[in-house]
Image (cartoon, rainbow, N blue to C red):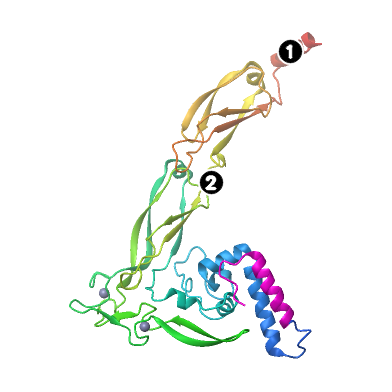
C-alpha cells in the first residue's frame, strides 16, 4: 500500500480508511489476528494523523511518541533509546510507509546522543547574559586512541558479522504479510567496520564516560523556559563519529520587583493623591538601574507611563523592550485637622 514517508494528511487518511474497513472486527468475528491488526492500524493512525505526534515520530522514532522507550525529560542525563526505535510500534510504521527504514540508510556510524540539561539563572543574569558552569557526565573522546577505537599501528577492518554492510536482514510479520526488514548490525552498530585491535582504554569505542565541566553562555534577553541548542556538545559518537547536541533549558528566577511580559517590563508605583494632582518627579527602578520619571499634574489612578527602550534586551539584537510604570494613587485614610480644613475649603470652591 506504500504510503510515502512524506505523505500528506489526506493520503494517510485514505490509507487508514481502506485498511480499517478491511480489518474491521465486524467483518471478521472471532479472528484474533485481524482484531490485533485492526488495533495496530488504529494506533498507527492516531500518531500519523496527529501532526505534532508525527513530527515527534519522524524526529525520535517510535520512542519519542510515548509508548515504550525513554524520551527523556529534564533532570537526568540518560536518554537511551532516543534514536534506536526498533521493534514494537516501529514495525507498524515500516509497514505503513512501505519498505524498510534500514535499507535506505545503508552504512552509518553511530552519532553521539543528544543530551538535555536544565539550569537556573537569576533574573539579573537574564538581563545581562551570563556564563554558567555545569558538570555533566557523558561520553567524551578517548585520548589513548584519539577517538579512533583501535590501538596504534592497528586499523579498522570490515565487520565480519555483516560483511561490512552495517545491516542484518530480519524477517518480520506485519499486517501486510511477511516483510524483510534490514536492521542495524549489532556488532558494529551499523558502521560496517570494527577495530582490528581494540583500544584497551575504551574497549574499541573511541570514547569514555567522564564527567566534564562546561561553561554555558546564556545570551542576554533569554526567556524563562527557553532551550538553547549547542551543536556538537552532546555525547561523542563511537569511533570518532559525529557528536550529539546539548540542549540547555534555562529557568529564570522570579524577581518580585519586575513583571516581565515578553521583552517589556512593568512596575507599579504608589503615588500620594496630592502628587497625582499636582505632578511630581519619581524614581523608577528598571532592569538597568534607577531612572527619574516626571509625573504630570492631573495623573489618573492606574495611568500607565511608558519609558522607551528600558525593558529587557531583545534576544539576539541590540534593541530593548520598554519599561511601563503603572501609577496607583493612594488616598489617605486619615487626615490631620489642618488637612481636613483645607480639603473642605477646596470642596467649597468647587461647589
Ligand atoms: Zn581508546
Ligand atoms: Zn557489522
Residue 4 colored magenta? yes
Picture layout, residue 169 above or below residue 351: below
Residue at x 74% of width, y 79% of height: 21
Q: Give the main secondary structure, helix, strand or loop, of the magenta stretch.
A: helix
Q: Quadrant of ligand 2?
A: bottom left
Q: Local crowd at mark 1 within 10 Å, few (<14), some, or many (≥20)?
A: few
Image quadrant where one finds the C terminus: top right
Picture layout, residue 26 above or below residue 257: below
Q: Mark on residue 203?
A: none
- Whole-percent x, y for residue 41 in the image: 66, 77
Q: How many marks?
A: 2
- Residue 97 left/right relative to 288: right
Picture layout, residue 284 above or below residue 110: above
Q: Local crowd at mark 2 within 10 Å, few (<14), some, or many (≥20)?
A: some
Given residues 306 and 109, the one toward you in this image is: 109
Label 2 or label 1, whichever lies nearer to me, is 2
Q: What residue does disc 2 label?
A: 254
Q: What residue does disc 1 label?
A: 341
Query: Could you say which quadrant of the image residue 294 lies in?
Result: top right
- Residue 229 visible, this angle: yes
Image quadrant where one finds the N terminus: bottom right
Q: CA distance from mark 2 to mark 1?
A: 46 Å
Which stretch is magenta? 1-23
Disc 1 residue lies near ligand 1 with CB under 8 A: no
First reached walking from the N terminus: tag 2 or tag 1:
2
Label 1 sits on a secondary structure element that is helix
Given residues 142 and 316, the one toward you in this image is: 316
Residue with the most extreme right position: 351
Picture layout, residue 215 above or below residue 295: below
Given residues 144 and 46, the one toward you in this image is: 46
Amino acid at each position: 500500500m506504500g504510503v510515502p514517508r512524506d505523505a500528506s494528511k489526506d493520503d494517510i487518511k485514505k490509507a487508514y480508511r481502506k485498511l480499517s474497513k478491511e480489518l474491521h472486527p465486524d467483518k471478521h468475528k472471532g479472528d484474533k489476528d485481524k482484531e490485533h491488526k485492526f488495533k495496530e492500524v488504529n494506533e498507527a493512525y492516531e500518531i500519523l494523523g496527529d501532526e505534532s505526534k508525527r513530527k515527534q515520530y519522524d524526529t525520535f522514532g517510535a520512542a519519542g511518541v510515548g509508548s515504550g522507550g525513554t524520551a527523556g525529560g529534564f533532570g537526568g542525563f540518560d536518554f537511551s533509546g532516543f534514536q534506536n526505535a526498533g521493534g514494537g510500534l516501529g514495525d507498524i510504521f515500516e509497514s505503513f510507509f512501505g519498505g524498510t527504514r534500514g535499507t535506505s540508510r545503508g552504512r552509518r556510524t553511530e552519532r553521539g546522543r543528544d543530551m538535555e540539561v536544565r539550569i537556573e539563572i537569576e533574573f539579573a543574569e537574564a538581563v545581562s547574559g551570563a556564563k554558567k558552569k555545569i558538570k555533566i557526565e557523558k561520553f567524551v573522546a578517548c585520548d589513548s586512541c584519539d577517538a579512533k577505537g583501535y590501538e596504534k599501528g592497528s586499523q579498522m577492518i570490515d565487520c565480519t558479522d555483516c560483511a561490512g554492510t552495517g545491516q542484518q536482514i530480519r524477517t518480520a510479520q506485519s499486517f501486510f504479510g511477511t516483510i524483510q526488514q534490514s536492521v542495524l548490525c549489532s556488532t558494529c552498530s551499523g558502521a560496517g567496520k570494527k577495530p582490528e585491535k581494540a583500544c584497551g582504554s575504551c574497549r574499541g569505542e573511541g570514547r569514555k564516560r567522564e564527567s566534564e565541566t562546561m561553561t554555558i553562555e546564556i545570551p542576554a534577553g533569554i526567556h524563562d523556559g527557553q532551550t538553547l541548542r549547542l551543536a556538537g556538545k552532546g555525547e561523542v559518537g563511537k569511533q570518532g563519529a559525529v557528536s550529539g547536541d546539548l540542549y540547555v533549558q534555562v529557568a529564570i528566577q522570579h524577581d518580585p520587583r519586575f513583571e516581565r511580559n515578553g521583552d517589556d517590563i512593568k512596575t507599579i508605583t504608589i503615588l500620594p493623591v496630592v502628587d497625582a494632582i499636582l505632578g511630581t518627579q519619581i524614581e523608577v527602578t528598571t532592569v538597568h538601574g534607577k531612572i527619574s520619571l516626571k509625573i504630570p499634574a492631573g495623573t489618573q489612578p492606574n495611568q500607565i507611563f511608558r519609558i522607551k527602550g528600558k525593558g529587557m534586551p531583545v534576544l539576539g539584537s541590540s534593541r530593548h523592550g520598554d519599561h511601563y510604570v503603572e501609577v496607583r494613587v493612594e488616598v489617605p485614610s486619615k487626615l490631620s485637622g489642618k488637612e481636613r480644613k483645607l480639603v473642605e475649603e477646596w470642596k467649597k470652591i468647587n461647589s
